[in-house]
Amino acid sequence: MAATQRIAAGAMAAAACAASLAGCSTGSHGSEEGTSGPQKGAPAPNSVLRLIGDGSTAYTGAQPHLPVPERLKPGEKPPQFVVFSWDGAGEDSQKLFSHFRKVAKENHATMTYFLSGVYMLPKEKRDLYKPPQHEPGSSEIGFNDEQGIADTLKQVRLAWLEGNEIGTHFNGHFCGPDGGVGEWSVEEWKSEIAQAKAFVKNWKTNTGMTRSAPLPFDYDKELIGARTPCLEGQKNFVKAASQMGFRYDSSGVNNQVWPKKREGLWDVSMQLVPFPGHTYEQLTMDYNFMVNQSGTQTQGDPDKFDYWGDQMRDGLLKGFYRAYDGNRAPLIIGNHFESWNGGTYMRAVDEVVKEVCNKPEVRCVSFHQLVDWLDAQDPQTLKRLRTLEVGEAPRQGWASFLSGHPAPAPKGVPGAPAVRQ
């Protein structure tokens, strides 16, 4: 898989004091959005602010806009979940991170942003990264500069405050033979995970941007899932991640069926959906549509840009309606902040979000929210849902299909009956 485009260079900008961090100091270049008080529609500032480590991150209380999951009632039809996720999330000159934050807010959606750790590491400090099976300071996607780090930090802060999830896409994005992630051992994956966390938890020390606002979350607790580069190395990554507190993985290829666990982690991999004009199905990722349209050329024939974007949009929509009218399996979509083939895939995602996220019984959510909901369900209900094939609606209807009486939820689990005092 092609590496995500390197963050653009530029002069340093000050980081935000976002909604829940109003009142903290900014850099010398002034403030950015959110510093004059809560944004319109943003939560009121939290009264809790406990700096962690060097102050790069902070505990600010529970994440705003994170819904409490509820168990399905007997006979209740499941909601249609849709997850839009972004590999190697960072803000560069294309401004796609900020764009899709806006698209999500306008369409009642939250998303998952898989942040690359090296986007928090200035190129002058590249030797701090010690990738498995490679020389220190190596990276297939480069490193960042102060402007890129500041811009990315701003988007990560605001995204989390809006209820979105910050996952990880790890660091150097090594694929293929000769030290690619598919060859890494469990211990090497543990090292890569630890470094991805460390670059996010110590960006102030590494950049010298000590007056900037912290990220408003404890990354050790918030980081619960990932997608591996090029979808390689899943087997050993999952073993490592299950020992390091992760709750899900999205590094494989699935059909549109209900998820199950692997090594204790929810397997919420991307899925195969119809590919208009072809007899075979296509993975729900912009890169894969591109490779099957223009090959390895990221900017192919301009006369085909609109057609290729329509193909991706229509393929994702066919997959959506197949689930929505069928087994209601969550639809998992993966993307990159790239302008491949003239940005046609970004336009396709825009149009899919606008069409599906405002429909009745649809929830466009992050992976965090999806696995919270899955964990809140009765295991027998999920087992029953997994008997449905791709696009298969219960023949007897949902009320009959899920009419059994599920086991009561354990105390303290979302959906459990209230405890009488």
Image (cartoon, helix red, strand yellow):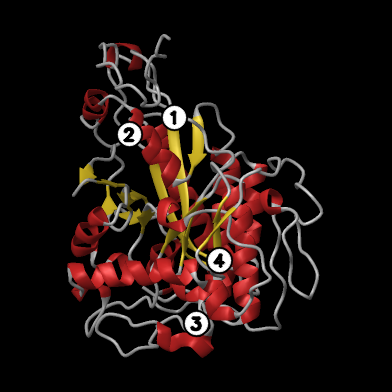
Between marks 1 and 4, how big is the CA–CA gap? 30 Å
At label 2, which amino acid type do we have? Asp
Q: Residue 193 is drawn in which quadrant? A: bottom left
Say what secondary structure mark 3 lies in. Answer: loop
Q: Earlier in the sequence, mark 1 or mark 4?
A: 4
> Residue 278 or 58: which is nearer the viewer?
58
Quadrant of the snapshot with the C terminus: top left
At label 3, which amino acid type do we have? Phe
Q: Which residue lies at the image location 48% right of the left edge and 66% below the top edge?
A: 201
State left or right for residue 120 relative to residue 253: right
Say what secondary structure mark 4 lies in. Answer: loop
State left or right for residue 359 relative to residue 117: right
Between marks 3 and 2, how big is the CA–CA gap? 37 Å
Q: Which residue is mark 3?
A: 143
Q: Which residue is mark 4?
A: 56
Q: In x, y percent, where is residue 314? A: 48, 49
> Is disc 2 surrounded by few (<14), some (14 to 19) or many (20+) residues within 10 Å?
some
> Residue 412 or 100: which is nearer the viewer?
412
